[in-house]
Amino acid sequence: MIKIGTALFEACEELERERGISKDVIISSLCDALVAAYKKHMHVKEAANIEAIFDEQTGEIGVFSTKTVVKKVEDPDMEISLEDALEIDDEVEVDDEVKIEVTPDQFGRIAAQSAKQVITQRIRDAERNNILNEFLEKKGTLTTGIIQRVENRNVIVNIGKTDAIMPQREQIPREYYKPGNRIRVFVLNVKETNRLPQVIVSHAHPEIVRELFELEVPEIEDGIVEIKSISREAGFRTKIAVWSNDPEVDSVGACIGPRGSRIQTIVGELKNEKIDIVRWSPDPVEYIVNAISPARVVSVDIMTDDEETKDALVVVPDDQLSLAIGREGQNVRLAHRLTGWKIDIKSVSQMEDEEAEKQSNYEYEEEVHEDSAFDSEEIQEEIEEEMNQQAFDEEDLDQESEEESSEIEE
């Protein structure tokens, strides 16, 4: 047996405290390393009956070979005679198994060299698995981190036991990420690699808004107010549709909070990003009207309503057209994402002009139709006249023929 003492337990306690790696992982790694070193030392490739055993009470570890007790030994590596076995254990019988220590002399240094590499690798694997399991549970949730640095336009954020990557596409445009600042990020994905797991986080994901509202609005956490939909253009504007399951609770008012305290906290967390809180409705017309806010709406016409296409025409006052569309179409674009409806916005004047143009086209078609009818009557009269004239000419010819015939007879 090899005497280890209390040093191993102290090292195990430190690893468990700092990295969350249990003592069993270290002891198991040490035993596996000792078996590998024994096989290499004894030039044995396969030895299924070889194992290392650690005695926690004495702090000793050794290599043992498990052999079957037989009357006549045929395979010395796997079997032991009953006489030899009784010297080890006086109660042993035939077909029992006994463990025989086979630890070589001066084996401590060899075992230590082999164990170092194995234990280091096992610790890395255990640490990687711990981090992977921890952040797989955090996937799809909000967490707090500290900005470490910016590399190749990627922001490196420390979120506890590992550094996460925030790609450029998940950053808020024009946002300055200063190293050392604390930041709330959304755990987007966790990828397993040969080294530590790669955690991808986002500062622009719409779910960040949902998490912030759940933190700040108790009614949402309690399930009284429900977030139905979120559409966001990070750094600029967000629309969020909410619904109250309790008729006595105003969903919009609950999200705004007393004197706007709740919404102000969320807006501050999002660096003054504008947030429109929209009241959700099962009626698509009412829902679209709410989603177009803050613009006033005159009317909403549902053009098509099926699973593949949902088209709606929204008419607004002339002075509300630019507000309804928004800068570079942002307001109507967010309303489309929020409701799932394709929204076409027109002003009252545009609708009147279209109606006038349609009326003009209709009158023109009527005139063309009347002219066509008149022309048809004239053509019909001409045809009748030609037919009458032809009949008259035929009568004259017949009369002339009769006169000529009578003259010949005379």
Image (cartoon, helix red, strand yellow):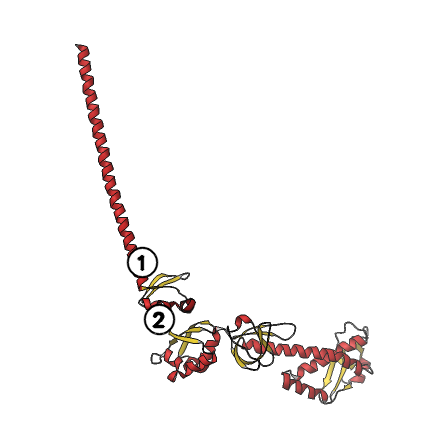
Q: Position of residue 67 (x, y in %)?
A: 77, 77
Q: Which amino acid does label 1 sit on?
A: Glu
> Residue 102: in sight, yes or no?
no
Q: Which of marks 1 and 2 is nearer the N terminus?
A: 2
Residue 317: x, y in percent?
A: 31, 67
Give the image quarter of residue 167. bottom right
Q: Which numbered disc covers residue 33?
A: none
Nearest to the observer: residue 291 or residue 285: 291
Residue 325 at x, y = what percent?
39, 67
Element type where label 2 sits in the image: loop
Tally of marks = 2
Q: Is residue 69 left or right of residue 381?
A: right
Badge 2: residue crowd in 10 Å (few <14, some 14–19, many ≥20): many
Identify which amino acid the numbered label 2 is placed on: Ala
The answer to whether residue 128 is visible is yes
- Which quarter shows the C terminus? top left
Residue displayed at 24% across by 45% down: 370
User: Answer yes or no: do the residues labelled 1 and 2 have beta carbons within 8 Å?
Assistant: no
Q: Residue at x 45, y 73 (%)?
A: 236
What mark, if any, has residue 354 been given in the picture? 1
Q: In which quarter of the image is residue 394?
A: top left
Quarter of the image with the N terminus is bottom right
Compared to residue 349, the image places residue 204 above or below, namely: below
- Structural distance between the alpha carbons of marks 1 and 2: 22 Å
**Label 1 Cα neighbours within 10 Å, binned few <14 / some 14-19 / many ≥20:** few
The residue under label 2 is 295
What is the secondary structure assignment of the residue under circle 1?
A: helix
Q: Tell whether 13 sits left or right of 37.
A: left
Please name the residue shown 47% across and 78% down the image: 271
